[in-house]
Image (cartoon, grey):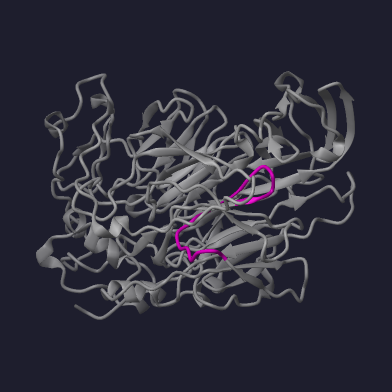
């Protein structure tokens, strides 16, 4: 085979039964062809294999049949029936699956360590992508490329497969579900175009706006509204460039910008439904940061308080004025390795503290970005050559982007980690979980699952910020996800994608179990005086920028004073591939606090401008003595 380093060569091996004829795997594409314009053949056959060379319909990879596990699964469900199928037996665990990392928790202090529970043994679809909707459901979806799932669509609502050789061939497996995280109930959703490795975010009215993907889905924009009967509405030809492994960022005016993707060194704005972009905006930075394994995919993107955009790809970043299409300044390189997919570090914008500002005007909070873990630059190349997997990166670095001369400050985590998830908790602490200590992102390119979450306290001095928490017993490596819930627990799902939802003969079977992690602040002896928001007191019309926002809360067993209380608002993100897009937490200024026994009237300042908090629905928490309430959904406009 031609010596080259395709980013997804691992996927070719893992999905050989689905995408390729074994006899046709002659060569992989030249990695330097990523700098050339994409042809139709590139879209139909991105790996450069199984092609007749004419770029036509005959070049579409063939999908052989996938082995079934139940007799009734050989055909579609009967009309008006749908539902879950059994989770196949996974077989005896392999040696690699038992080589896990569990960190010792500190038993010499009286601090709680958190707890794990299983919400569901079968979500129907493995959660490669995850988002929390405001009607009490999580949306989970993966890709149509890997074949079947464990959830059947209704017989009269199947999806037409555009890649099948026979016209009008239908796919009756669901590839997306709406998941009730309170009781584990699942409702199938119908995806038309391939969402594999796509992006997303919430608009100003709470709709999930979802972009890009693979094959017929790489230029698509999809909409899902928060209701019990809603389903996807798709616009498959919305973008000028394909957006596979791109990042979607909400802007102050409520629009979205989508950055990057495979061989897409550009960005563009999500058009209005039914419209399409004629051209994209070139972004040379993305070309400059690519390499022979494309270590610049799923760039880390954050909206800054002045309205500019921070973009980090591979090992360095820029600050972009998207209105003027101007790079304001370059951010110093972060040494040590690569951080973007497939090196897959964790990253977030640290909480924005508004308590020092004035309601109208005043200085913006100083934005600080954190990036933890990742992989050596050559990790993917070493893995594809079948060599011993490289140890992941252990460093964790921060930079204050308000400082023109800022440099990265670095410390080590207790364990190396790649493909982890990083969530901001209502308290302002960060939770790091999932992932592995060796390898990088890719199909079978990582081992050494890290089962222990880490609590990171950004306000503590170096050397005191990390604390290991109670470990899960489920390995979640590639394509695992996590999301903060309104009750301040964390939903954990997905991981270990295999072709045809394979549960046997692999080190890490496709994961459909869904867990809930209760952080230490919710352990019983800590949370006895957990605050409770009076939901009836929350203004029905939500927040308005630069105004006061009053409401009430109570504590059940003891009084608290203003100094004990913090009010935070959290933007629910869209999470995939270890990155939570549009995630941000703001700490609001308290302007009035009136106690009446164990009941309290409180008023906070709403953020003064959409650059601090783009329009949309947020989770507002009251945190009393380090314990968060359940959140109120509040719209800011």
The residue under the point 42% across, 59% down is: 101
- Looking at the picture, tell me which residue is in the foreground, 381 or 222: 381
Looking at the rendered structure, the number of numbered marks drawn on it comes to 0
Q: Give the residue furthest to the bottom.
A: 3
Using the rendered view, name the quadrant where residue 486 is placed: top right
Q: Is residue 36 visible?
A: no
The residue under the point 69% across, 68% down is: 399
Percent position (x, y) of residue 217? 37, 49
Percent position (x, y) of residue 463? 66, 65
The residue under the point 48% across, 58% down is: 246
Specify the segment rendered in magenta: 413-430
Q: Is residue 54 visible?
A: yes
Q: For residue 274: magenta?
A: no
Residue 23 vs residue 41: left or right? Answer: left
Quadrant of the drawing holding the N terminus: bottom left
Percent position (x, y) of residue 548? 85, 34
Q: Give the residue furthest to the left.
A: 23
In this view, 489 is above or below 196: above
- Magenta stretch secondary structure, dominant: loop
Quadrant of the drawing holding the C terminus: top right
Percent position (x, y) of residue 327? 67, 71
In this view, 558 is above or below 457: above
In this view, 108 is above or below 264: above
Residue 527 vs residue 5: left or right? Answer: right
Q: For residue 414: magenta?
A: yes
- Looking at the picture, tell me which residue is in the foreground, 249 or 514: 514
Using the rendered view, name the quadrant where residue 437 is placed: bottom left
- Looking at the picture, tell me which residue is in the foreground, 80 or 590: 590
Q: Give the residue furthest to the front.
A: 108
Using the rendered view, name the quadrant where residue 158 is placed: top left
């Amino acid at each position: 085979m031609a010596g080259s380093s395709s980013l997804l060569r691992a996927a070719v091996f893992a999905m050989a039964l689905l995408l390729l004829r074994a006899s046709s795997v002659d060569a992989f594409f030249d990695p330097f062809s990523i700098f050339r314009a994409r042809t139709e053949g590139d879209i139909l056959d991105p790996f450069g294999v199984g092609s007749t060379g004419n770029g036509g319909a005959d070049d579409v990879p063939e999908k052989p049949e996938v082995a079934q596990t139940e007799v009734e699964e050989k055909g579609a469900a009967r009309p008006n029936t749908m539902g879950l199928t059994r989770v196949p037996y996974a077989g005896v665990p392999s040696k690699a699956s038992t080589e896990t990392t569990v960190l010792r928790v500190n038993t010499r202090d009286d601090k709680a360590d958190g707890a794990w529970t299983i919400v569901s043994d079968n979500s129907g679809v493995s959660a490669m992508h995850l988002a929390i909707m405001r009607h009490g459901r999580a949306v989970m979806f993966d890709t149509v490329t890997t074949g079947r799932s464990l959830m059947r669509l209704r017989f009269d609502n199947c999806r037409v497969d555009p890649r099948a050789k026979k016209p009008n061939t239908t796919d009756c497996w669901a590839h997306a579900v709406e998941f009730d995280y309170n009781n584990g109930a699942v409702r199938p959703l119908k995806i038309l175009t391939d969402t594999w490795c796509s992006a997303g975010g919430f608009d100003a009215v709470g709709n999930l706006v979802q972009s890009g993907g693979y094959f017929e889905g790489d230029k698509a924009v999809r909409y899902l509204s928060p209701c019990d009967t809603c389903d996807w509405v798709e616009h498959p030809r919305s973008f000028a460039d394909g957006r596979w492994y791109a990042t979607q960022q909400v802007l102050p005016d409520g629009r979205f910008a989508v950055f990057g993707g495979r061989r897409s060194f550009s960005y563009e704005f999500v058009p209005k439904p039914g419209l399409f972009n004629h051209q994209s905006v070139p972004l040379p930075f993305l070309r400059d940061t690519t390499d022979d394994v494309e270590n610049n995919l799923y760039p880390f993107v954050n909206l800054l308080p002045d309205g500019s955009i921070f973009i980090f790809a591979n090992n360095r970043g820029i600050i972009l004025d998207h209105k003027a299409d101007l790079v304001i300044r370059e951010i110093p390189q972060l040494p040590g390795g690569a951080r973007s997919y497939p090196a897959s570090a964790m990253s977030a914008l640290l909480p924005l503290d508004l308590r020092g500002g004035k309601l109208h005007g005043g200085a913006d909070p100083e934005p600080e970005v954190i990036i933890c873990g990742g992989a050596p630059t050559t990790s993917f190349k070493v893995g594809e050559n079948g060599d011993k997997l490289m140890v992941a990166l252990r460093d964790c670095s921060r930079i204050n982007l308000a400082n023109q001369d800022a440099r990265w400050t670095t410390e080590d985590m207790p364990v190396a980690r790649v493909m982890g998830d990083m969530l901001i908790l209502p308290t302002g602490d960060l939770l790091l979980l999932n992932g592995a200590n060796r390898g990088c992102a890719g199909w079978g390119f990582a081992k050494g699952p890290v089962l222990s979450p880490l609590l990171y306290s950004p306000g503590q001095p170096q050397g005191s910020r990390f604390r290991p928490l109670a470990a899960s017993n489920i390995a979640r490596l590639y394509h695992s996800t996590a999301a903060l819930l309104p009750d301040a627990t964390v939903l954990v799902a997905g991981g270990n994608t295999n072709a045809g939802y394979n549960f046997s003969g692999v080190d890490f079977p496709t994961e459909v179990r869904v867990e809930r992690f209760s952080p230490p602040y919710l352990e019983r002896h800590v949370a006895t005086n957990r605050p409770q928001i009076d939901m009836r007191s929350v203004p029905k019309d939500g927040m308005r920028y630069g105004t006061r926002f009053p409401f009430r809360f109570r504590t059940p067993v003891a009084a608290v004073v203003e100094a004990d209380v913090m009010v935070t608002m959290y933007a629910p993100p869209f999470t995939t591939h270890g990155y939570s897009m549009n995630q941000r937490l703001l700490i609001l200024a308290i302007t009035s606090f009136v106690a009446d026994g164990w009941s309290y009237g409180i008023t906070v300042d709403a953020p003064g401008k959409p650059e601090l908090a783009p329009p949309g629905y947020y989770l507002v928490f009251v945190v009393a003595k380090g314990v968060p309430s359940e959140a109120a959904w509040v719209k800011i406009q």
